[in-house]
Amino acid sequence: MGSPVMVEILTAVLGDGLSAVEAACAEALREGVHSADVVLNILARQREPPTPVPLLTPESLRLRHEPVADCARYDSLRRAP
């Protein structure tokens, strides 16, 4: 009879593949953590798409005057003229 923790990890093999689960288990063990939740978290982070490279904004589209946050101006809209 297997432990529920092992069942969770083996179930992840169906979706992520054996090599990915093995690498996640090895990473968790290197960090000294023995938890299925940690292994599943590592797998989830590996599935996330990489952060996109920021686009360079052409000079013609850059703001000449940055907007200033001024919440008080909304108070003036609430007052009746």
Image: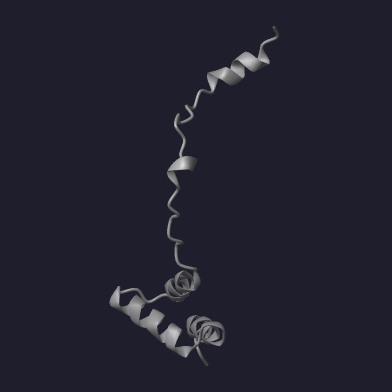
Between residue 22 and residue 54, name the one nearer to us.
Answer: 54
Q: Check the image and report above or below for 34 versus 3.
A: above
Q: Name the quarter where the C terminus is drawn.
A: top right
**Camera-side residue of 50 and 5:** 50
Which sits in the foreground, 1 or 53?
53
What residue lies at 44% left-to-right and 83% top-to-bottom? Answer: 20
Image coords of residue 14 (percent x, y)? 56, 87
Q: Residue 48 placed where, x, y %?
A: 49, 69
**Residue 33 against residue 1 in the figure, above or below:** above
Give the x, y percent position of residue 32: 30, 74
How many labels were placed on the picture?
A: 0
Q: Position of residue 2 (x, y in %)?
A: 50, 90
Furthest residue in direction bottom, as rendered? 1
Identify the residue shown where x is 43% and y is 76%: 39
Q: From this viewpoint, which residue is outermost toward the right?
A: 80
Instruction: Report the residue at 43% width, 43% height from top.
Output: 59
At 47% from the left edge and 89% from the top edge, which residue is drawn? 18
User: Quadrant of residue 28 in the image?
Assistant: bottom left
Tell which residue pokes out farthest to the top in this image: 81
The colouring scheme, among rainbow, by chain, secondary structure or one colour, is one colour
- Asked if 58 appears above or below 40 in the picture, the reply is above
Left or right: 4 as drawn, with respect to 19:
right
Which quadrant of the structure image shows residue 77? top right
